[in-house]
Image: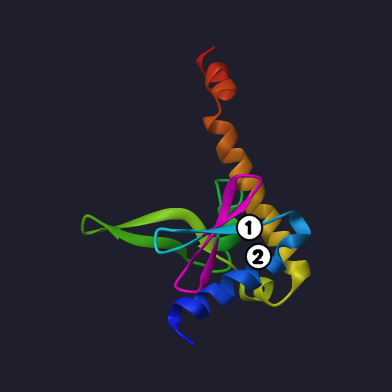
Amino acid sequence: MTAASAEGAFVDYIVDLMQSIGPVNAKRMFGGHGIFLEGLMFGLVADSVLYLKADDTSSKDFTDMDLGAFTYIKQGKATKLSYYQCPEEALESAEEMNIWANKAYVSAIRKASEKSPASKKRKKR
């Protein structure tokens, strides 16, 4: 099995595991895959590792477990994104994945609401 087909199988597994939170799907992007629900990206897979969206409210849950942030090199500098490695237990349990996927999706909703035109109008007042 090639690395690309192994990653594709891993992505299919993750998408199936997350179906308890809704119709999750994956899209190829940036050499990996974005994990989406209702148009919001709340996860990403890079090199067969699942990373979940976090924000100020949830990032401590990941860092307390020593889970690293997704990092890539941009113009010679390491750039961290607000996606953290998924706990191993969640990859092995639909119940655990439900908890962590929901946490990531809620973080994506909060982030999207910060960017919405309605929220920008409220901030200007």
Which residue shows up at 57% across the image and 62% down it?
A: 62
Which residue, as the protein is rendered here, is positioned at the far bottom? 1
Calculate the distance from the C-alpha at mark 2 to the C-alpha at mark 1. Answer: 6 Å
Residue 36, visible in the rendered structure: yes
Q: Quadrant of the C terminus?
A: top right
Residue matched to label 2 = 15
- Most foreground residue, 19 or 108: 19
- Give the farthest residue toward the left: 76
Q: Amino acid at mark 1?
A: Asn
Q: Residue at x 61, y 39 (%)?
A: 110
Instruction: Kindly identify which numbered label has been placed on residue 61.
Output: none
Q: Residues within 10 Å of mark 2 (few under 14, many from 20)?
A: some
Q: From the top left corner, tell me how far across and down residue 3 is, in percent.
A: 44, 81
Q: Name the N-terminal-most of marks 2 and 1.
A: 2
**Camera-side residue of 35 and 125:** 35
79 displayed left or right of 15: left
Q: Secondary structure at mark 2?
A: helix
Q: Name the dominant secondary structure of the magenta segment.
A: strand
Q: Which residues are magenta?
A: 34-51
Task: Where is residue 6? Give x, y as percent.
Answer: 51, 80
Disc 2 residue type (three-letter): Val
| Residue 25 within the magenta-colored segment of the rendering | no
Q: Secondary structure at mark 1?
A: strand
Q: Residue furthest top?
A: 125
Contact (CB < 8 A) between labels 2 and 1?
yes
Residue wearing tag 1: 25
Q: Is 113 situated above or below 27?
A: above
Residue 84 placement (x, y as % from top left): 52, 61
The reply to whether the magenta stretch includes residue 38 is yes
> Residue at position x 78%, y 68% from top?
95
